[in-house]
Image (spheres, grey):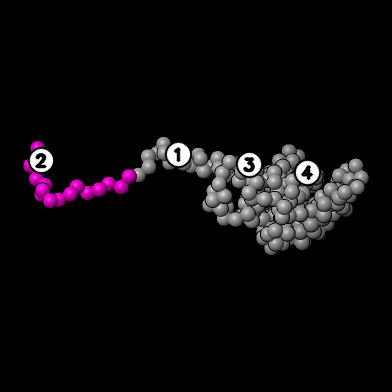
Amino acid sequence: MDMEKKSPGTAAPKRTARAGAPERIARATQRDATISRLLAVARAGFAEHGYAAAATEEMVHAAGVTRGALYHHFGSKEGLFRAVLKQVHAEVAERVGAAAQAEPDDWEALLAGCRAFLSAANDPATQQIMLIDGPAVLGWSEWRQMDEEHSLHLLRDHLDLLAGQGKLRTRRTEPLAHLLSGAMNELALWVAQPGGSGDALAEATAALEETLNGLRA
């Protein structure tokens, strides 16, 4: 039995209210849902109108959130675009990687990955966000860094693999990776140009494969 007596003038220590696990989970779920809605709406807006013409007022209205929520999660319109661009880069890289991994032969894996990139980049939304607005909005330096993180390193690593197997006519894989990456980006934009041939994608793919096969040892 506790015989200690409290002084009449001594107040009991206050306890700071802390959110329980269910409340924290609910807040995190709400935050993730808000971010997902903003990304989906922004991606559609940037794809349809381009970065400059896409209005944040319309985005927050369509997402059912406040402007404050946009700035809280992304900092700015540019920050929102950056997040969308990362999402697009990651999806393209995933498609390229999946196509390459489906081929048992390493050389065929290179061709399959390049074909997958051109196919993915043939999507008008991807072209607008990743190839047109990406470099213009963020600058070439940041855009290249993002491309390196998601796609370029996959291409370079695979070229290193082929060079190590003696299947390439050159061992200069670093500049070759940049050369091929730039060529594929330009091909994707060429395919998308107004008034182009309906067979432009097939022609671009064939030209790329002829170039790659010319490098084969």
Which secondary structure, mark 4? loop
* Depth check, front residue: 90 or 68: 68
Which secondary structure, mark 1? helix
Graded by Cα atoms within 10 Å as few (under 14), some (14 to 19) or many (20 or more), the crowding at tag 2 reads few
Graded by Cα atoms within 10 Å as few (under 14), some (14 to 19) or many (20 or more), the crowding at tag 1 reads few
**Mark 2 to mark 1 CA distance (whole Å):** 39 Å
Image quadrant for the N terminus?
top left
Q: Three-letter amino acid code at disc 3?
A: Ala
Q: Residue at label 2?
A: 2
Q: Residue at label 1?
A: 25
Mark nearest the camera among 3 and 4 is 3
Which secondary structure, mark 2? loop
Which secondary structure, mark 3? helix
Q: Three-letter amino acid code at disc 1?
A: Ile
The magenta-colored residue range is 1-17
Q: Residue at label 4?
A: 123
Q: Position of residue 40 (x, y in %)?
A: 64, 42
Circles 3 and 1: CB distance less than 8 Å? no
The residue located at (74%, 41%) in the rendering is: 99
Label annotation for residue 62: 3
